[in-house]
Amino acid sequence: DVQLVESGGGSVQAGGSLRLSCVASGYTYSRYCMGWFRQAPGKEREGVARTDSDDKTTYTDSVKGRFTISEDNAKNTLYLHMNSLKPEDTAMYYCARISCDTWYPLDDWGPGTQVTVS
């Protein structure tokens, strides 16, 4: 079974940094594009960052220049490096396998990891 387990969230002050991790298992990690999503209270889930089929990355406008998505295929792990955090980044963050070059998730959502910026 596919499993994606997010970690690394926490409470930080505005301007701070966090690194989220997503450990994948149950499939061949390197064969899939991956994405980070977030959902704030009362809002719809949105795509934040993703890896694309041409080894490029895509970010939603609000995080460009502040967040970086990366991955370690040897560790089956996806990362989201978040710098210059703002209160509006407060949300539950999720990782997912995605249909390459889209924000379409391929699996059910995992537990997520909470990020709170004050």
Image: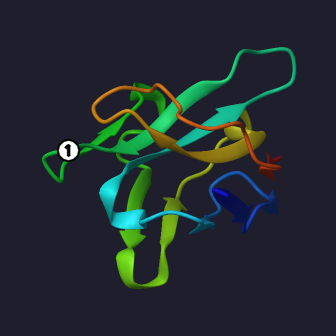
The crowding category of the residue bearing disc 1, from other C-alpha atoms within 10 Å (few below 14, some 14 to 19, many at least 20), is some
**Left or right, 8 with reference to 24:** right
Q: Position of residue 99 (x, y in %)?
A: 38, 33
Color scheme of the displayed model: rainbow
Residue at x 65% of width, y 62% of height = 16
Q: Secondary structure at mark 1?
A: loop
Which of 109 and 12 lies nearest the eye of the viewer?
109
Where residue 20 appears, x then y in whole percent? 62, 64
- The residue tagged 1 is 53
> Which amino acid does the dot numbered 1 rest on?
Ser
From the viewer's perspective, tell me whether residue 117 is left or right of residue 33.
right
Question: Residue 23's spot in the image, x, y percent?
Answer: 61, 70
Q: Quadrant of the N terminus?
A: bottom right
Report the residue at 78% width, 28% height from top.
40
Task: Determine the residue positioned at 49% across, 65% down.
Answer: 78
**Where is residue 11, by image quadrant?**
bottom right
Q: Is residue 36 above or below residue 75?
A: above
Q: Taking 20 as reference, is 109 above or below it?
A: above
- Left or right: residue 56 versus residue 15 is left
